[in-house]
Image (cartoon, rainbow, N blue to C red):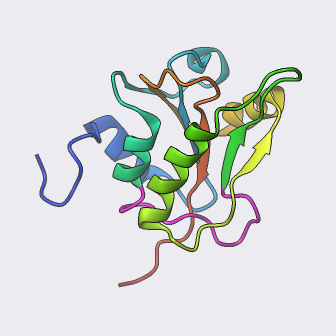
Amino acid sequence: MLRGISPLLSPDLLAGLCRMGHGDEIVLADAHFPAETVNRRVIRADGLGVADLIGAILPLFVLDSYVPDPIVMMAAAEGDTLDPAVLNRFRRAIEAHAPDAPETSFIDRFAFYDRARSAWAVVQTGETAKYGNIILKKGVTPAE
């Protein structure tokens, strides 16, 4: 255990966040996401919800301020709908640590899979909410 670091962050996830550079992306994926199919670097976070992981990551992780979309979610497929409670949970977790974060962007499922292929890693969570996937782009960590 480390002081000041959430116990939700496994050693693998913590090391991954440290290894990421600015502009790298990490996918926090729901339990149904085809993580192993789309990315060779998968970090397991079974039993954890995406909003809880956002809350554990963002105290350590600066969102990229040089792009218009450092926060991206999967849009609902045609004829389907997103549960607004999912976005609300994710946004509350984001805004608790990044109150000036831009709005969440939405891209279709296949564009999301393409982004996940080029992401630094996919974190496979225990999130069961439909469309409970989000991409966070790491920014430049400011000098303290």
Q: Is residue 126 above or below residue 60?
A: above
Q: Quadrant of residue 132?
A: top right
Nearer to me, 119 or 99 = 99
| Residue found 58% across the figure and 50% down from its top | 136
Q: Is residue 47 left or right of residue 84?
A: left
Where residue 18 appears, as percent x and y from the top left, is: 39, 54
Decide: is 41 above or below 32: below
Is residue 98 visible to the viewer in this orientation of the structure?
Answer: yes
Q: Residue at x 70, y 32 (%)?
A: 82
Main SS of the magenta part reads loop
Residue 108 picture location, percent across and down: 83, 33
Q: Quadrant of the C terminus?
A: bottom left
Residue 88 belongs to the span the image colors magenta? no
Q: Residue at 64%, 40% (x, y): give it.
A: 84
Between residues 36 and 83, which one lies in front from this camera angle? Answer: 83
The verdict on residue 61 being magenta is yes
Tally of numbered discs = 0
- Residue closest to the far bottom: 144
Q: Which residue is nearer to you in this view: 138 or 127?
A: 127
Image location of residue 94, percent across then percent down: 49, 57
Residue that sits furthest to the right in the current view: 78
Q: Residue at x 58, y 20 (%)?
A: 35
Drawn side of residue 50 relative to residue 110, left or right: left
* Quarter occupied by residue 7: top left
- Range of residues picked out in magenta: 58-70
Residue placed most toward the observer, 23 or 113: 113
Q: Is residue 79 above or below residue 119?
A: above
Q: Quadrant of the N terminus?
A: top left
Is residue 120 visible in the rendered image? The answer is no
Residue 92 in picture, x, y percent from top left: 48, 55
